Image (tube, helix red, strand yellow):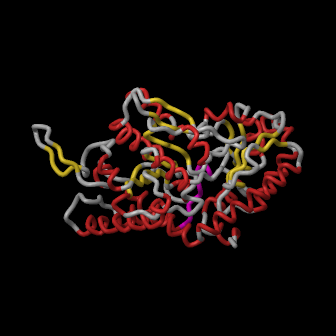
Amino acid sequence: MIDVKKIRQDFPMFYNHVQMQGKPLVWLDNASTTFKPDCVIEAVTEYYATETSNSHRGDYDLCYAMDKKIAECRERIASFIGADSKEVVFTSGTTASINLVAFGYGLKYLTADDEILLTQAEHASNVLPWFKVSEMTGCKIGYIPLDKDGRLTVENLRKVISSKTKIVAVAHVTNVLGYIADAKGLAKVAHEFGAKIVLDGAQSVPHIKTNVKDWDIDFLAFSGHKLCGPTGIGVLYGKFDLLVKTDPFMTGGGMNAKFDMCGDVGYLAPPMKFEAGTQNIAGILGLKKAIDYVDSIGMDNIEAHERELKAYAVEKLLQTGKVTVYNANSEAGIVTFNINDVFAQDAATYLNSKGIACRSGQHCAKILNDFLGTVATVRASFYFYTSKEDVDALVEAVKTGGNFLDAYFN
C-alpha cells in the first residue's frame, strides 16, 4: 500500500506550488513528465556544487571519482531493467535512443525489399525516425492492426509479419490508450521471422517491472524525466552483439580509440562508442537516484496503485454522464477522454482554471486519430504520488465542464 500523503513530502513541486500559487496543484500529466524527489534534486546539485568534473577526460582525483560514479550508475540502471552494464547506452532520452537504433542499425541493414512494422498508436518518436529510414532505404512501412479496443496483440502481429519484416518497433505501453503489450510474446513472434524488436519503454519502464533478458527484446528506449529523474537523460538498451553491429549516430570525443590524418578511425566498444562528447553527467547521477527512489517504493506497488486509480477514475467519470472515455479497459494509469460537446483544448483550459493539469490534443500520436474517431482528446495520467482526491477533483471539474468559456473570460 502506498502512502501518498507521506510520499508527497519528498516532492518540492507540491508544496512550492501552494506557496507560489496559493492553491494545491492537481498534477495529472505524468505521461508527459514527472516531479522530482528531493534526493534527485540533491544529487544534481551536489554534482555542480562539489563534484564537477568530466568523465574519462583527466588524470586527477575528481575525474577518477566521477569515472567510478558513472560506472556505478550504469550498473544500477542495468540491474533495474535486467540487463548487463555493457548494454546500457546513455542518451538524451527516448527520442534520441530510437533515432540511434533507426539510423545506426536500421539504415545500415535495411533494403528496399524489407519491411518495418509499427502500429497506429505509436508516439511520433517511434514513427518519424522509421519514416525517414524508409525514405532513405526504400523499405516499406507496415502496420500491425489494433484490436477493437486499440490493443496491440501477439495474434495480430502474427497475422501481418512475414519474412520481409526486419524491424518490429512498438510501444510497450501506448501513451494515449495505455494498453500494456505482451513484450515477451511479441519478441518471440518477431524472432520466429528473423526480425528485431525495438520497444519504446517511455511509458512502461517508470511504471512496471522491466526485464529485457526474460522478454528477449533486442532494443529498449526510455527517458529519465518520466521516471522522476532529470530531463535530458535517457537510456538505450541493446543486446551487446547488436550494439556491436550498430553504427554510432554521433561521432566525436570520448567514443573513438584512434584516428589519423588518413581518416583511419577506430571506435571504442559499446556502450562507449555511442556516447560522443561530454555526457549529461548530472542527469546520469540524478537518474540513478530516481531509480533508487522508485525501487524503494516497489514497482509492483506502483503498478497496483495506478491500476486501482485508473479503475476508480473511469468509474467516477462515467458516472457523471458527461464524458466519453476511450480506453476504459486498458491497464496503465492513463485515462483518455473528452467532455461531451467540448473541444479537448477548451476542456483542458477549463480544468486548468480549477487547478488541474491535464494534457490535451493529439499527444504526438497523430495517426491514431482515425482509430479514435476524434481529432483531439484530454489525457489524465497518474503516478505513485497521485491520490484519489486528485481524481475526485478531476471528476468534480468535469461535472461543470460545459462552462468552459468561464476559463477564458473570468
The residue at 54%/50% (across/down) is: 186
Q: Is residue 104 shown above or below 232?
A: above
- Frontmost residue, 150 versus 56: 150
**Residue 302 on image: x %, y %:** 63, 65
**Residue 232 on image: x %, y %:** 45, 50
**Which secondary structure is most common in the magenta stretch?**
loop
The residue at 73%/32% (across/down) is: 374
Q: Which residues are magenta?
A: 31-38
Tell me if residue 390 can be seen.
yes
The residue at 32%/45% (across/down) is: 246
Classify residue 22 as left or right of residue 174: right
Tell me if residue 233 can be seen.
no
Q: Is residue 359 shown above or below 131?
A: below
**Residue 298 on image: x %, y %:** 59, 70
Q: Is residue 254 shown above or below 292?
A: above
Of the 4 image quadrants, the one containing the C terminus is top right
- Frontmost residue, 47 versus 253: 253
Is residue 276 one of those drawn in magenta? no
